[in-house]
């Protein structure tokens, strides 16, 4: 029986799939980033329907509010050569289609329609009145998955240090002015007086 909850789920799922396809098909990079933002909003709605409120809000606050805003600013400031991007897309299009077909076939073979439904995955039991999925998530994250969580933190720290190192390296092929050298300059280093004898005027062939 189709309930309003199913209608909302199918609506969010349709929006997520359409916007995800738009991310890789539109030619304008700004529109691609905006399509990814719409995808995140749709997935946040689906997670909210699954009673994963914490993950849904984190997706909106962290990814949409911070990461995607940064991506949007970077894409708008970069000068992207659209012709080279378009030629690269056309060049790798057959390879991409083959990869998509392989992944789709493996997904259908591994997870078929017979593995869906309430018979295979029954509905979860009703939650107690004072249930908190944030508390349950934290308990699992910091007990069973404590080591993977710490390893992920170390990897992110290494990525941050690498990004800072690459950003603060010396300029390459860029003309910059050194204020200290300009202030400490001496007149004799800039101007050289050369004493030359005066040039004599040549007499013309015709007399005035």
Image: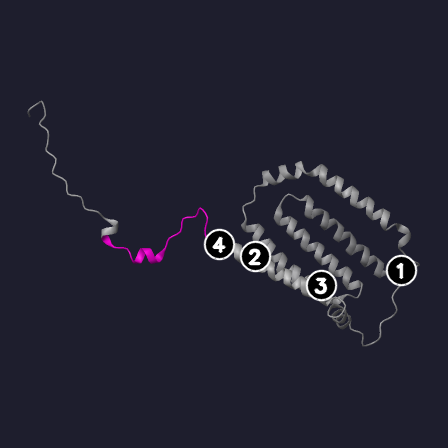
Let me know if residue 193 appears in the view: yes
* Label 3: how many Cα within 10 Å (few below 14, some 14–19, many 20+): few
**Distance between the Cα atoms at labels 4 and 2?**
11 Å
**In the image, is 77 to the left or to the right of 8?**
left
| Badge 2 vs badge 1, beta-carbon distance below 8 Å | no
Q: Residue at x 59, y 39 (%)?
A: 84
Residue toward you, 38 or 197 = 197
Give the residue pinned by disc 1: 121
What residue span does the magenta drawing correspond to?
Answer: 169-187
Sequence-wise, the earlier of marks 2 and 1 is 1
Q: Residue at x 46, y 48 (%)?
A: 172
Give the residue pinned by disc 2: 162
Give the quadrant of the N terminus: bottom right
Judging from the image, what secondary structure is the residue with disc 2 in?
A: helix
Q: In the picture shown, does residue 148 fall above or below 36? A: below
Label of residue 148 in the image: 3
**Distance between the Cα atoms at labels 2 and 1?**
44 Å
| Badge 4 vs badge 1, beta-carbon distance below 8 Å | no
């Amino acid at each position: 029986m189709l309930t309003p909850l199913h209608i909302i789920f199918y609506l969010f799922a349709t929006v997520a799939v359409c916007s995800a396809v738009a991310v890789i098909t539109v030619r304008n990079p700004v529109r691609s980033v905006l399509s990814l933002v719409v995808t995140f909003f749709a997935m946040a709605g689906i997670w909210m329907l699954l009673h994963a409120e914490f993950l849904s809000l984190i997706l909106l606050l962290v990814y949409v509010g911070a990461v995607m805003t940064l991506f949007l600013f970077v894409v708008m400031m970069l000068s992207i050569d659209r012709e080279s991007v378009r030629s690269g897309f056309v060049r790798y299009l057959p390879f991409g289609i083959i990869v998509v077909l392989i992944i789709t076939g493996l997904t259908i073979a591994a997870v078929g329609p017979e593995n869906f439904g309430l018979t295979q995955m029954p509905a979860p039991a009703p939650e107690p009145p004072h249930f908190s999925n944030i508390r349950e998530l934290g308990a699992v994250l910091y007990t069973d998955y404590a080591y993977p969580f710490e390893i992920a933190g170390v990897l992110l720290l290494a990525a941050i240090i690498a990004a800072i190192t690459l950003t603060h390296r010396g300029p390459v092929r860029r003309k910059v002015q050194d204020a200290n050298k300009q202030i400490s300059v001496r007149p004799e280093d800039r101007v050289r007086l050369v004493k030359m004898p005066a040039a004599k005027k040549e007499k013309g062939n015709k007399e005035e």
